[in-house]
Image (cartoon, rainbow, N blue to C red):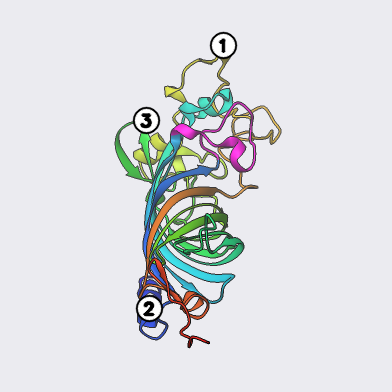
Amino acid sequence: MKKLLVFTLLVLFISTANAQYRWDVGLALGGSNYLGEMGGKEKTRQDFVLDLKLNQTRWVIGGFGRYRVSRLLSVNGGINYLRLQGADRHSSNPERVGRYLNFRNDMFEFYVRPEITFFQDNDLGGRGRYKTDFRLFGYVGAAVYLSNPKGQINGEGDWHSLRPLRTEGQDSEYSNIGFALPVGLGFYFTKNRKYRFGFDIGWRTTFDDYIDDVSTTYANPADLPSQLSIDLQNQHEYAPSTVNGEPVPDQYQYGYWDSGGDSPVSNNKRGDPTHNDSYLTMNFTFSYVLKGQSNFYKKRYSWIKGKRRIGRKSRAKF
């Protein structure tokens, strides 16, 4: 994984020497949120943004390089460092509050995405000086991330890495490497053909259900590797007795679905393996266009020199 990242970055930056005027490099700063088993609103489960808890929004920072293939197509590659976080105590669903789990996950994400321009204005404001242009684009890409979920007991004290604890009785640790499909929209302004200010919002669909360490069922405590595993897999004892006037269900009855039977052994659902986890990022971006203007500007607007328009020389006719 590390070799792949290093190799890709070398290719990106070495290529700048052979493809002048087409690159911009920059930084991203924004927020992240996630959709999974943890937290959520009053209903059992809602897809996409309907189940997000805004008070669990955390940060994302990153760097990127973007190569303009043509006027309408660019390729963006970069690295993000982000935090995802969730806690059942913030939910208004009594079943989830009764489970009373929590997590946070500091993730590294490497992505590559083609950006297709849907709308462009090369002379924003129409003043004929071409000092500011605008691009609106969409993208669908691919991403690889490193995941390391951690949890607290009763939402207090130290954060404990959950993968080694195998809280759902796994035979071995699940992988800390995952794959995602980023899909999103964005825009940017280019000022003086050098500085770009933008914003993008992207949704990541993953192929993993353990970003929050919750997916299937409660394990028999006798099968867990340590007392810490037992303490972190089941925290019902810390849950309040009511939520918004509604009683919190008894242990194991968390309402994701009914597997049948009356005993905890046959109705011990801890998560929902039929839906993988996903997450959202919202970034403000700033980048610098290498060597100033792109080939597009060079070919089409070479007559522009700062604020002056250089007219064509001609002889006077008498």
**Judging from the image, what secondary structure is the residue with disc 1 in?**
loop
> Answer yes or no: do the residues labelled 1 and 3 have beta carbons within 8 Å?
no
Residue denoted by label 3:
155
Q: Which residues are magenta?
A: 37-55
**Gap in angstroms between the C-alphas marked 2 and 1:** 57 Å
Q: Is residue 218 above or below residue 115?
A: above
Residue 9, given in percent of the width and then of the height, sits at 37, 74
Task: Tell me which secondary structure the magenta stretch mostly adopts.
Answer: loop
The quadrant of the image that shows the N terminus is: bottom left
**Gap in angstroms between the C-alphas marked 1 and 3:** 22 Å
Image position of 99 (left or right of 269): left
Residue 33, given in percent of the width and then of the height, sits at 48, 43
Residue 245 circle label: 1
Residue 245, given in percent of the width and then of the height, sits at 56, 11
The amino acid on which the numbered mark 3 sits, given as a three-letter code, is: Gly
Image position of 149 (left or right of 75): left
- The residue at the point 38 percent across, 80 percent down is 16
Residue 7 circle label: 2
**Judging from the image, what secondary structure is the residue with disc 2 in?**
helix
**Gap in angstroms between the C-alphas marked 2 and 3:** 40 Å
The tag earlier along the polypeptide, 2 or 1, is 2
